Image (tube, rainbow, N blue to C red):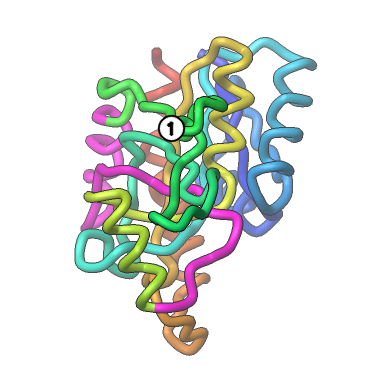
Amino acid sequence: MRILIVTAVPAERDAVLAGGAFPHVDVLAAGVGPAAAAAGTAAALSLAPYDLVLSAGIGGGFAPAAPLGALVVATSVTAADLGAETPDGFVPVDELGFGTVRYDVDPELSARIAAAARGVLPQVVEGPVLTVSTVTGSAARAAELTARHPGAAAEAMEGFGVATAAAAAGLPVGELRTVSNAVGPRDRAAWRIPDALKALGTAMAAVLPVLDES
């Protein structure tokens, strides 16, 4: 199986590569945000044939489901803020009739990833991962997101862009996020970015051999 892994920044790419070299795996740092992720993924898919696309990196975890250091394996990838504000509240773009805001991950794929990661990490969570264009920085915003998306486990900024490009190419997609911070009030002193990057490398070292055997 040939796999394309899309990260946002070089530090995430390097963390994935620290997990080991696999001849059928390419790792790309496409940039921050869904637009950069979609463009970078689409460009890579136009240059070589792939069987699977993964969005990977660090992200925020929704308490109490995904605490600091946990790995979140996406069961779905949702564009959490793609839509319209109305007097009655937020309306997602699919309800407006303009497309989709959610891609479901193959349950077998997410289960295989989670099972492999549980052998090397103390906490692995399976659940929806939200893609946002603006990182959450308040308790009110966190509460709004969890109310609209029950069961959400993590938020990041690239997954929906990666999934959109993969879907356009007819390819399955997955997403993995190691939790560097809690979703909510912005507290940089509480961030654990180096730990999350290390956990990402550990997870990928366990997951990629399993997927590479497919």
Of all residues shown, which one is farthest toward the front? 87
* Residue 74 vertical placement versus 189 (above, below): above
**Image position, residue 117 (x, y; %):** 30, 43
Does 27 sit left or right of 183 as displayed?
A: right
* Residue 172 vertical placement versus 135 (above, below): above
In-front residue for pair 175/38: 38
**Image position, residue 163 (x, y; %):** 54, 29
* Residue 99 vertical placement versus 87 (above, below): above
Residue at image location 46% in from the left, 48% down from the top = 80
**Image position, residue 29 (x, y; %):** 70, 45
Mark 1: few/some/many CA within 10 Å (<14, 14-19, 20+):
few
In-front residue for pair 166/193: 166
Image quarter in which the C terminus is found: top left
Does 122 sit left or right of 79 as displayed?
A: left
Quadrant of the rendered image containing residue 205: top left
Quadrant of the rendered image containing residue 180: bottom left
The three-letter amino acid code for the residue at tag 1 is: Glu
Residue 121 located within the stretch drawn in magenta? yes
Q: Which residue is mark 1?
A: 95
Residue 148 located within the stretch drawn in magenta? no
Residue at image location 37% in from the left, 72% down from the top = 182
Residue at image location 52% in from the left, 44% down from the top = 56
**Stretch in magenta:** 111-138
In-front residue for pair 126/70: 126
**Image position, residue 158 (x, y; %):** 58, 46
Does 101 sit left or right of 70 as displayed?
A: right
